[in-house]
Image (cartoon, helix red, strand yellow):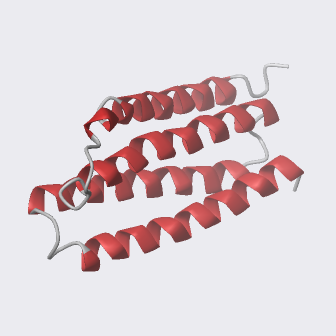
Amino acid sequence: MDKLSKNIVVTASILAAITIAIGAFGAHGLKQLVSAESLVTFETGVRYQMYHALALFVIGFASAIPPNTKKWVFRFFCIGMLFFSGSIYLLALKELLPFSISFLGPITPVGGLLFIIGWGLLARGLLTINRG
């Protein structure tokens, strides 16, 4: 396994573990603290973070994917997780925070766009396999 693939798989494993911890916090620690709507929002962030952590895990082990594709998809997915899921977590917790975080609202769709770009790059990279 090359260094890039190893870094992707290790990062994906850490992100998956963090996602489970965040999900457990949301399921058990937030029920009494935030509204049901905020809890659903929080769960959306957890779900998308796990989808992309698992996708990175698979990408890391997929030797047929060109290294440049892996590198860029890895970057877009990680930054997308930070922007999308990270902003969703904070927005879901806004009832508990002593300061306004409404400025994060526009960050969430940017994270979603980064996910879309990452998936598009993955598709393009897969289409170029065996073209020579």
Residue occupying the point 66% across, 30% down: 126
Residue 45 sits above or below residue 19 on the image? above
Residue 59 sits above or below residue 119 on the image? below
Residue occupying the point 45% across, 53% down: 49
> Given the current orientation, which residue lies at the most extreme bottom position?
28
Horizontal side, residue 104 vs residue 6: left or right? left
Q: Position of residue 82 (x, y in %)?
A: 50, 45
Tell me the quarter of the picture where residue 111 sits: top left
Query: Quadrant of the image for the C terminus?
Result: top right
Tell me the quarter of the picture where residue 64 sits: top right
Between residues 104 and 40, which one lies in front from this camera angle? 104
Horizontal side, residue 103 vs residue 5: left or right? left
> Given the current orientation, which residue lies at the most extreme top position?
132
Q: Position of residue 74 (x, y in %)?
A: 65, 41
Residue 65 sits above or below residue 85 on the image? above
Residue occupying the point 72% across, 49% down: 62
Q: Position of residue 33 (x, y in %)?
A: 17, 71
Between residues 17 and 83, which one lies in front from this camera angle? 83
Horizontal side, residue 55 vs residue 27: left or right? right
